Image (cartoon, rainbow, N blue to C red):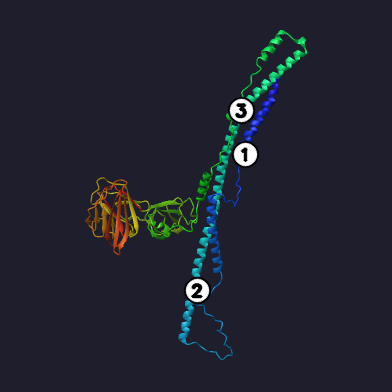
Amino acid sequence: MDQVSSKPKDLKIAVCEEKILSDIRNSLPLLPKIDKNANDSNVQKTRKSGEDDLFDRLASAISKQKQYEQSVNAAWFVDNAGLHENFINDGSIKGAQLPKHVEENIQGIAQSAEDYISKLEEQLQDLDCADEQIITSANKALQEIDEAYQSLINEVCCQINRKRDLIRLETEVHKNEGLAPLKACRQEINAQIRSTQHLLDLVQEMLKYPHSFNRQRFEELTSASSNLGRIPAVPLPEELPCITFCHPSRAVKEKVLTKITELGCVSRMGPVQLLEIEERPASLYIKWHIIDPEYSGEEQIFIVQKTTGDSVDSVSNNFETVYEGSETSCFVRDLSVNTPVSIRVGIQAPHIVWSILQTAKTSLAPYCWNLTNENYMITNSGKVAAKITNEISTLFSQEAQFDAEHVIEFKFLEASTDGSNEEGLALVSDSGGKDDDLKRKGALLITPQGKIYMDGEEKLMRLPKIRFGTRILFSATRKYEETLRINIECADKAVTYDWIVQTPLYFAARFTEFNKWNLIVK
């Protein structure tokens, strides 16, 4: 009978347990209750002070805009109010003419005025573009601000709710782990009460009905009574959980709030801006400068990035870094001809503020070899030259393309270990024939042994020997009108020479062995 009656009770306990677990798992997330008038923390007081300053600046800027919207005349405005006061059209002035020199002067003034108006209207168009840049960039920034902080709010609220749920779960664990032994103790006490009450009922029944007495019954009662006096131990209060929530300290809250106030910023414009973009063969040469004096006092690390196409999204993830360093110019190389690229520059920092995007393209064909020398096989759109005979021969570039503020790189895909000082790679002022030894006036030659010849004279400095995988890079700047400063880099060594030479320059290669020399120009 007892077993049958326990099943509904067990079922009830199971349902109760499932409800508790379900409530914990499905607890509703907390949502922020924003009180804009709260001024308890130091962070909020600092924020309020900064906010007041910004509101003052905004009110002042809006007031100035309204002031400047009023139509005004230039200081030299000519009043024509009295021009026709004494004019009477009575036919007496028919045929009247201005003196010729006066008429010519007035016509000149009219033409100048029309030209001036045309230029001023162009300026107005530039102002329209400027307005559009400011308004468009500001609206985009406002949208990005809302999106970024909404995402931050979502993530922070999600994390806070996860922490809240974890703390609540831990509290439920402590509560139920503490209640479990108490329930066991309660169950034991209730069992003792039931057993004792049953014993009492039997004793009273025996007293009421003496004829029911027998020895066996008496021994059972005596044996059962021996259990009387067993009092289960109830835990003392100091032995029981007293669950307490430890609130986040004020210092921790201030630290978290301070960190939040440091998340994100807005800049009027980037501290560095692009200055010039010049076309180069299959590349662009770009310069930039710092416009914010705050960043001018120390050396900065600049980052230049590009993306294909006319991009308007300065925060796109499609940008790739093409330069990182302390120089204020670089080459953006390996570009497709007449394909626009968007370029930006910034200063390395935790939050990089990029320059205004500029779009440019190069119309100059890439460096390439001449196709007419039968001793070389030219492939890869004229970029790769491979020696295919055992006859020493000089190969020149298709055109003279190398000049000041240019860079050109050669990589040896194959190289002979027996190269001589009669062979090599060169920059030359004019294109000679196949027998040109490149040790002459107007030639800068690098031999496979690393020797350097300028205008036919051997230099003291040497570069590493040319081997498979060797890269040789030439770059140039204009020192004087007729002088180039040439920098040559090979492996971990670099040399610099001032060279009086007529530009632009051809590049050339002179090699002998069949199937031992293969190089690409970039």
Contact (Cβ within 8 Å) of mark 2 with mark 1: no
- Can you tell which quarter of the image residue 497 is in? bottom left
Label 3 to label 2: alpha-carbon separation? 92 Å
Q: Nearer the viewer, residue 342 or 171?
A: 171
Q: Is residue 63 left or right of residue 196?
A: left
**Badge 3 or badge 2: first in the primary sequence:** 2
* SS for callout 2: helix
Q: Give the position of the N terminus as an image quadrant.
A: top right
Residue at the extreme top: 215
Please tell me how many numbered marks the rendered image carries.
3
Q: Nearer the viewer, residue 382 or 508?
A: 508
- Tell me if I can see residue 432 in this picture: no
Q: Give the number of the disc on residue 180.
A: 3
* SS for callout 3: helix
Residue 220: x percent and y percent? 69, 12
Q: Nearer the viewer, residue 385 or 169?
A: 169
Disc 2: which residue: 117
Residue drawn 39% across and 60% down? 278
Amino acid of disc 3 = Ala
Q: Is residue 74 left or right of residue 198?
A: left
Badge nearest the viewer, 3 or 2:
3
Badge nearest the viewer, 3 or 1:
3
Q: Is residue 197 above or below residue 146?
A: above
Label 3 to label 1: alpha-carbon separation? 24 Å
Disc 1: which residue: 27
**Badge 2 or badge 1: first in the primary sequence:** 1
Residue drawn 52% across and 89% down? 96
Badge nearest the viewer, 2 or 1:
1
Residue 276: x percent and y percent? 40, 61
Label 1 CA crowd tier, 10 Å (few <14, some 14–19, many 20+): few
- Tell me if I can see residue 19 in this picture: yes
